[in-house]
Image (cartoon, rainbow, N blue to C red):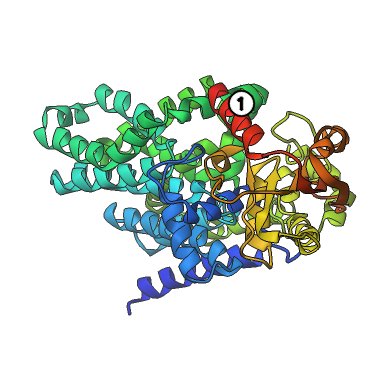
Amino acid sequence: MTKKNLILAGFLLAKFALQYLLVDPIYELHRDEFLHLDQAHHLAWGYTSVPPVTSWVSSIIYLLGNSVFWVRFFPALFGALTLWLVWKTIEALKGDLFALILGAMAVLFSILLRLNILYQPNSLDVLAWTGFYFMLIKYFQTNRAKWLYMAAGVFAIGFLNKYNILFCLLGLLPALLLLPQRKVFAKKELYLAALVALLLIAPNLWWQYQHDFPVFHHLKELNDTQLVNVHRWDFLKEQVLFFYGSLFVLLAACYALLFYPPFAKYRFLFWSLVFTLFIFTYLRAKSYYAIGLYPIYMAFGSVYIAHLLQSGWRRDLRPVAILLPILLFIPMYQVGFPNRDPEYVIKHADKYKRLGLLRWEDGRDHTLPQDFADMLGWKELAQKVDSVYALFPNKEQTLILCDNYGQAGAINYYTKNKRLRAVSFNADYINWFDFSVRHVNLIRVKNAIGKAEELAETSPYFEHSALAAEVSNPYAREYGTAIFSFIGARIDIHKPIRRDIQEVKERQ
């Protein structure tokens, strides 16, 4: 094994190790992860929440044992492959060993460490953006059509993982049209590659059509409840924070793409960055939607900085450039990861608040960062549901109905009784109700807000009713969530449930 490959292997191992070490054991899986894991039991070409690729990965996780280790492994793997692609891009740009190490440091000690903690489509999304740009770079280097077909394949995987990659294309097209690289639009191979991509994503498009395009409802709901709280200036400020330890590398890339002659054929990437950020800013996108833009630019910046520091006294600055990303990463380590218990976060709230980390999707500041609060209270909820379920007669005829997908998914993941299948009117669970069983009992998991009326409204339809338990972890986003037990239905409870499902779907 060559020296370069040994160093690369070291970076990849460090990447995997850090992804596990940066999570304090007090934290559980995240709300979104439970939904994605449950999709393994309901394979389809699409979902209300995401395209199908996540469910395929979840199936692999399930076959491997469904442990937390494997849940964390795959986002770490996608992050490691992103680093590897940046390394290969630097090699393609003829960067030396210093450029390779600098680029790897820039990617390793960045927001990707935070992103790659959670099993969500975002990690693969960043990898897909990076892979797509890499294939285009190789195409414009070699003019070989195979790279267009490979780019089409990467785009299709990215699309089937998260529709966000469409913004990569929207920013890229006008950038290409501005520059001599527009000649690619006269190549028949481009349109054949586009056809390949379309064929690959067609099953998901057909699924969307069959289900009246739930993606549009999801986007509208997202805009009405979350994006409306996004301020454009905050979006732009947060872009700086994502790779602030290697911001000098990103700035070097932007300059080099405009003025460094060896990079002239890649100048479209500068304008692609500008157009994509403009689109995201105009649409009030969440700041992390744009993370996939940046890794590929670390390759260009690293190669250009290596050129600047290749001789004389400037060469002495190379160790400083390599150490800078890790030195500037230290403040991020203190506040940017779930590596501190809730008591520490509360005690040092000012540090978190200054960086906007306590601001949730509702636009208000809270006690913990939202992601941290979304990683607490789930085991407690599942254990208490198990305890209530154990006391029920006719257990196999018990329906567990939750207010949100996090509750349903956490119960299904952490329950000791794997026959339990909690559902909800929320997200994909609305399509997963099982009416083949006649339910006579109900465990109702109700949000803290709204729980006061549940007992009075539902108890008349059952022989026995009680508030059985509540989530007591004060740091959990689910704090105060109630667990009601209803035994011995006096009516066919499937009828009102079917009616509620229909009403929810009509609103969608």
Label 1: state its secondary structure: helix
Front-lying residue, 306 or 287: 287
Q: Tag 1: Cα neighbours inside 10 Å, few (<14), some, or many (≥20)?
A: some
Label 1 belongs to which residue? 227
Q: How many marks?
A: 1
Front-lying residue, 244 or 460: 460
Q: From this viewpoint, is residue 144 visible? A: yes
The three-letter code of the residue at mark 1 reads Leu
Q: Position of residue 397 (x, y in %)?
A: 66, 54
Q: Residue at x 75, y 35 (%)?
A: 359
Q: Is residue 31 left or right of residue 298?
A: right
Q: Name the quadrant of the N terminus.
A: bottom left
Q: Name the quadrant of the C terminus.
A: top right
Q: Residue at x 61, y 29 (%)?
A: 499
Q: From this viewpoint, is residue 300 visible? A: no
Front-lying residue, 500 or 38: 500
Q: Is residue 99 left or right of residue 14?
A: left
Q: Position of residue 434 (x, y in %)?
A: 55, 48
Q: Position of residue 212 (x, y in %)?
A: 42, 26
Reply above or below: 50 against 443. above
Reply above or below: 15 against 211. below
Front-lying residue, 456 or 271: 456
Reply above or below: 163 against 39. above
Q: Is residue 110 left or right of residue 262?
A: right
Q: Is residue 290 left or right of residue 470?
A: left
Q: Residue at x 69, y 33 (%)?
A: 361
Q: Residue at x 48, y 46 (%)?
A: 249
* Residue placed furthest toward the front: 490
* Residue placed furthest toward the top: 282
Q: Position of residue 261 (x, y in %)?
A: 27, 38
